Amino acid sequence: MNIGVLIPLIVFLIAIFAIGFIASKQMGSGGSFLQDYFLGGRELGGFVLAMTMVATYGSASSFLGGPGTAYTVGFGWALLAMTQVVTGYFVLLVLGKKFAILSRRYDAVTMIDFLKARYNSPAVAILSAVAIIVFLFSAMTAQWVGGGRLIESLTGLNYTTALFIFAISVLVYVTIGGFRAVALTDAVQGGIMVIGTLILLIGVIIAGGGIPAIMQDLLNENPRLVTPFGADGSLTAAYVSSFWILVGVGVVGLPQMVVRTMSYKNSRAMHRALAIGTIVTGFIMLNMHLIGIFARPVMPGIEVGDKVIPLIALEVLPPWLAGIVLAAPMAAIMSTVDSLLILVSSAIVKDVYLNFIQPDAPEKKVKALSFGITGVLGIIVFLLALQPPDLLIFLNLFAFGGLEAAFIWPIVLGLYWKYGNKYGALASMVMGIGSYIAIHFYNQEYGNLLGVHTVTIPVVLSLFAYLIGSLTVKREPFQF
């Protein structure tokens, strides 16, 4: 067991526990339990809002998979990844004030609350809840596997013990503290991501003999590594440009991002989050992918991309500093998992139980149910992550894209187009999910259809489905 690496991680986990307990003490100060537990009482300031959006969006793929791909593909993948810089800005710009105002008017605690009120349709609410529970549950399980594997590789503990430590850490602060704990820990984890990426980038550059020497090594190995087209020339202009739909435009449809636009305190907080979130996202994404590329000459021959960051950190940094730096990918995974956990819990408690089973449930029962469901979800995910079925890993590959294809137009056009109705919303969701799954299978077998990313065509088809369904079945303007 690497004690030098383990001690900083233990300190990090203790800090996360402490934040969860502090948040639990504030529970109930912001009004109703539901508002507090699932939205933090709508009291997030600009910095916390920005960091919780950055930390929720930055997951295992941003800190392990992305740099690992950059290690293999070169600067072309870093260029592609930088399209994510505007993600937080774009989400707040499109949804921003109007979504927050309407969600308060409808007393919406979740994204599905908003969709139910906007379209006055139980069918829309039920289909939305099913999509969120199925897709995000599977995505969350795969993230937990990543967290367990990271702790395993860093500490020398066996996988089951590592996964148990990860699960307990997340479950305690999320179950007790709710959304407020998630947001506060995301702020801390976002800060760790910024510091960790900077330290590791400096360490890799020094180990490689400076940027000029690293660039020359890359050119000597394969000149395509420093071009926008990738080491094998596979990054075409069509694919790179269409990728922005997945990580830029389409993020407006991700429930875990949407719910954050309901939680800020005032316009000033939102405007501050726009600036802070954009800068921090750009800093982290650029640094992490440069680390992946620069690691290639320093440690050639790494075959598994997900191991690039842990291996290079342990190679170029002393153990205690590597432990601090590697808290960054741990923070990225935890901050994504906690957001998905509270989101799935809210879908079950608020969007299914309170909407369709017992709308007049007393607050005491709702409180117990919220704690219980969140805890049970975490236990189920832990058990699945011990030996994850192939289906869950498969679903994780297209979970976010499927959610984007399902929700982007019901949310955006539901906000800005008065003729949008439940028929258009249902048609868009069914078309988005169905076409995304079908095209995903096609691309797996025959390569990318039309050379664009899988999410591109379903987003377009779901738009047409929304327009046709809204205009041909029943055209009545909605009064905002």
Image: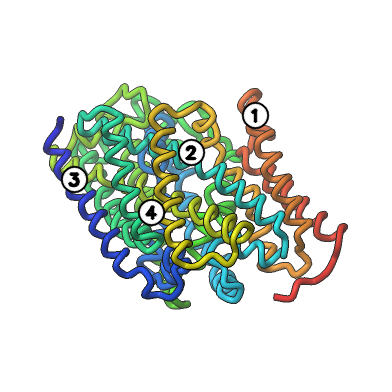
At a point 20% along the width and 52% down the height, the residue shown is: 14
Find the distance from the CA under tag 3 to the CA under tag 2.
40 Å
Label 3 to label 4, Cα distance in Å? 20 Å
Amino acid under disc 3: Ile
Give the residue type that dot 1 points to.
Phe
Residue visible at 52% across and 45% down in the picture = 136
Label located before the other in sequence (4 or 1): 4
Residue 273's place in the image compared with 16, above or below, is: below
Sequence order check, earlier mark of 1 and 2? 2
Where's residue 157, x and y in %?
A: 22, 30
**Quick one: SS at disc 3?**
helix
**Location of mark 2 (residue):** 228
Tag 1 secondary structure: helix
Q: Which of the two marks, 1 or 2, is nearer to us in this view?
A: 1
Is residue 143 visible to the viewer in this orientation of the structure?
no
* C-alpha distance separating marks 4 and 1: 30 Å
Way the structure is coloured:
rainbow
Under circle 4, the secondary element is helix
Figure quadrant of residue 97: bottom right
Above or below — where is 48 with respect to 387?
Answer: below
| Mark 1 lies on residue | 441
State which quarter of the image contains the C terminus. bottom right
Residue highlighted by disc 4? 55
Q: Which mark is residue 115?
A: none
Q: Nearer the viewer, residue 328 or 236?
A: 328
Q: Residue at x 36, y 44 (%)?
A: 333
